[in-house]
Image (cartoon, grey):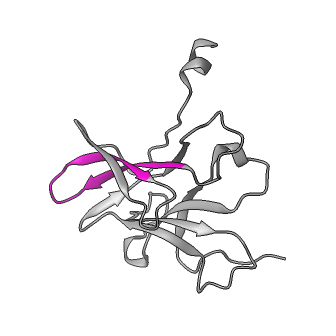
Amino acid sequence: MRLPISIRNVELGVINQAYVGKKNKFVYGSVAEESMLPDHDSIPKCAELVKLDLDVSSNRDGRTVASRIYGPNCYGGEPFFVAREPENPNAEEDDGYLVSFVHDEKTGESRFLVMDAKSSQLDIVAVLKLPRRVPYGFHGLFVKEKDLENM
């Protein structure tokens, strides 16, 4: 059986990488509103990040359990989930951080946001101002230092 997990246009979905190939409860994605959808092959402008609950037994109205709106004229890229304790097999699925690049089209400033994935408003725990703009649709990946050393 197929069930929609959101009536909104959720793009660039990600999960905790420790749950790839396993049953997971949460997915995180960027929301592109209808007025921000691009023509044909370009990347949508995403003004919000959401955390969705995949539990079909949930009686909630919709599946959004947390969200972060970036602000006026601010659009984000693909989120990525970074586990707080990646080596802890007993860590909760949403115990970690969501990271994303955000660009303010009015000021031209770009920032790297770190958000608490467990909080109901995806609270910002760190902001890094970037020296250059990161294009919408930029894909990133976090690699552990020990994995880099083994290459």
Quarter of the image with the C terminus is top right
Residue 111, horizontal then vertical, whole percent:
28, 46
In the displayed structure image, the side of residue 102 where residue 129 appears, left or right: left
In the displayed structure image, the side of residue 65 where residue 59 appears, left or right: right
Residue 38, horizontal then vertical, whole percent:
42, 66
Q: Camera-side residue: 148 or 90? A: 90
**Quick check: 140 above or below 35?**
above
Residue occupying the far right of the picture:
1
Numbered range of the magenta stretch? 96-115
Q: Camera-side residue: 36 or 121? A: 121
Residue 108 in magenta stretch: yes
Residue occupying the far left of the picture:
107
Q: Residue at x 52, y 47 (%)?
A: 80
In the displayed structure image, the side of residue 1 where residue 140 appears, left or right: left
Which quadrant of the figure has residue 7?
bottom right
Which quadrant of the figure has residue 63?
bottom right
Residue 129, horizontal then vertical, whole percent:
24, 41
Q: Residue at x 73, y 47 (%)?
A: 20
